[in-house]
Amino acid sequence: MATGSTSTVQTALRFLPEWLESRDGPIVRGRNLSIAFDPTRLTGCRRNWRGTDVWEIEGVVKFHPRGDVVRGTLLEPIRTSGVVTGHSPKALEVTVPSDATQIEVWFHNFAEVGGRCDAWDSRFGQNYWFDVEGPNPIIPQDPVRYREATVANADLVNVIGQTAVKKNVFPAPPRGPRVGKDLRTSLYVQAWVKNIAFAKDVWLDVHVFDRDAARIQAGTFALSWNGSASGFGDLFRFQGEIYKGSTATPGSVSPKPNASLVQYRLYYAVEGTTYTDAILHQLELLDDAVI
């Protein structure tokens, strides 16, 4: 998830032994959130294969009302001669989106080697809910719309990695600072799709918004095949430029709107049907002034 124009202030949310929870402050839009989890809360799928620990625990965070999901490991492997022989806790770091009003959190312990095993810490299926505070949510004026005649099925298509980055690509001199600006915004998305048939298309509908949440760019971008994946799936990836911002050289300035947000929807077409994960994904960008 892009960090964007967020505060470095961080709130820590801790899930402790004996089913206790604590946090050291409010969860605030635009700020970083650290989620720490004690592995002793989830022990249902601890598996060792030939001296190697082959189990994992991941945290899942869902931001409401938009439904974007971030997941990541909560374990740091401990290796002995290259073999994973144990784990230590590792916090999951996320950024709270500028439009979030609540977050939903749950945890998944799983193992695949030796047969699938799954266990959850989810408050008996209700999950853990927390309100989000801060400035009024930023809602774009023209969000990426859901395409008609598509089928929502996250079991067939979903995002496993995403980043939006704004960079100054103006050439740097051999010595000293840059003397100009050439701001470009790029998007990286890695998607998993179920391998239903050989012929398939995967694409993104993308909008870029300025700091007033007005749309300044729109486009559709194809993802390219990036290899096979577990679960009878394929990986598809997009990595490219989606917006050209302001440029400035000594004696010349070409201003463009200040890109602040990137939104996209993911689609997968196979055997005459188009599927989507039904999530309006959103990533936040740094302000032009700090790049």
Image: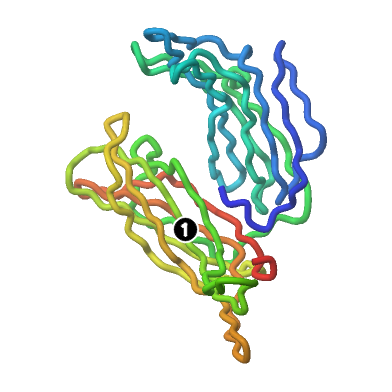
Which residue appears farthest toward the bottom when viewing the image? 251
Residue 272 picture location, percent across and down: 21, 50
Q: Quadrant of residue 140?
A: bottom right
Dot 1: few (<14), some (14–19), or many (≥20) neighbours within 10 Å?
many
Q: Is residue 150 left or right of residue 208?
A: left
Left or right position of 110 against 198: right
Nearer to the camera, 129 or 245: 245
Residue of label 1: 187
Residue 191, image x, y percentages: 38, 45
Q: Is residue 84 above or below residue 243?
A: above
For the residue labelled by badge 1, is the local secondary structure a helix, a strand or a loop?
strand
Label 1 is placed on what type of residue? Leu
Residue shown at the point (63%, 67%) measured from the top left: 213
Count of marks placed on residues: 1
Q: Residue 197, located in which quarter of the rendered image?
A: top left
**Which residue: 57% across, 29% down?**
59
Q: Quadrant of the C terminus?
A: bottom right
Q: Can you give x and y, in whole percent of width and height, for residue 108 in the image?
A: 52, 22
Nearer-the-camera pick, 206 or 180? 180
- Percent x, y of residue 174: 55, 71
